[in-house]
Amino acid sequence: MKLGVSTFVTDESMLPGPLALAVEERGFDALFLAEHSHIPVSRETPYPVGGELPRPYFRAADPFVALAAAAAVTSTLRLGTGVSLLIQRDVIHTAKSVASLDLVSDGRVLYAVSVGWNREEMRNHGTDPRTRGALLDERIEALRTIWTHDEASFSGKHVRFDPIFQWPKPVRVPPVYLGGNSHVAADRARRLGDGWLPNAVRDPVQVRAQLALLGGADLPVTATSAPADERLLAAYAEAGAERVTLSLPPGSEADTLRRLDRLTTLVPAYR
């Protein structure tokens, strides 16, 4: 099993280039960055884990810009979105952004997507929350079509475009991981994903039950935003997870490096 880091990059945090270099130098496998285009002033949709919405959600940098900065200063670090809100993105622009990032990073992109949770945010992008699952399915298929065909077209219920040319193509077709914790998310990962990206559980006893949602499918699992709990990591490794990303709260460079050094003590067991 591999260990990565999941975090936000914001206008108040350590810059993505130095952060990525520090993560790579300490032996972590991957860096996953969160995405929110904005947070609506209306707060009708509750924060899924309860309580007030944390400050980084309001200040998240564009993940593709941040990961491009990360790509420029690293050579082995995998570059992930955790997660990209594809239901809120133009699929043709997104295909180019992901392919361009894969090009400049020499094939290191892990593209994780999800249906999202903030209904007001979706609506501001013209997305109907009631059909976001079906929309995500079609946009994933459309992305792969654009990445793999010189003349790409798509005709679905929610996504339609006539034949187009788009380059650059990715160095390799980026693996698409489906985010989400529910059996619905696990089912979507089985149907459409190259991997599954659930949030890590907190109790080691619950790990096998979580992975059982895949119904025995042979699909890579990256459990994301885990606490620095040796017993939990051991449980994921024993259950066959591909990777666990450790949660790193965004902060100043000095504070981030201190936190990162504490997390680094867990790396040697998983190299």
Image: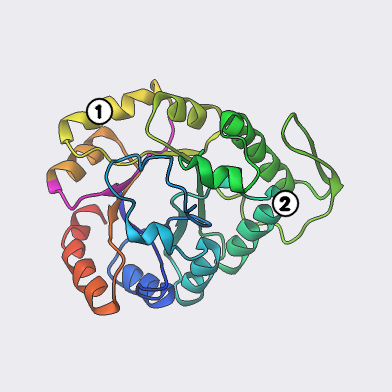
Rendered residue at 67%/53% (across/down): 95
Q: Which residues are magenta?
A: 218-230
Q: Residue 73, image x and y in percent?
A: 46, 77
The vertical placement of 92 against 108, above or below, is above
Q: Residues within 10 Å of mark 2 (few under 14, many from 20)?
A: some
Q: Is residue 226 inside the magenta stretch?
A: yes
Q: Is residue 155 left or right of residue 214?
A: right
The vertical placement of 124 against 72, above or below, is above
For the residues labelled 2 and 1, the Cα–Cα distance comes to 38 Å
242 or 129: which is nearer to us? 129
Q: Is residue 45 inside the magenta stretch?
A: no
The vertical placement of 19 against 200, above or below, is below
- Residue 217 found in image quarter: top left
Query: What amino acid does circle 2 point to?
Result: Ile
Q: Earlier in the sequence, mark 2 or mark 1?
A: 2
Rendered residue at 65%/40% (across/down): 139
Q: Residue 206, image x and y in percent?
A: 21, 29
The vertical placement of 161 against 213, above or below, is below
Rendered residue at 49%/55% (across/down): 36
- Is residue 171 visible in the rendered image? The answer is no
Label at residue 92: 2
- Identify the secondary structure beneath mark 2: helix
Q: Which residue is mark 1?
A: 208
Farthest residue toward the front? 42
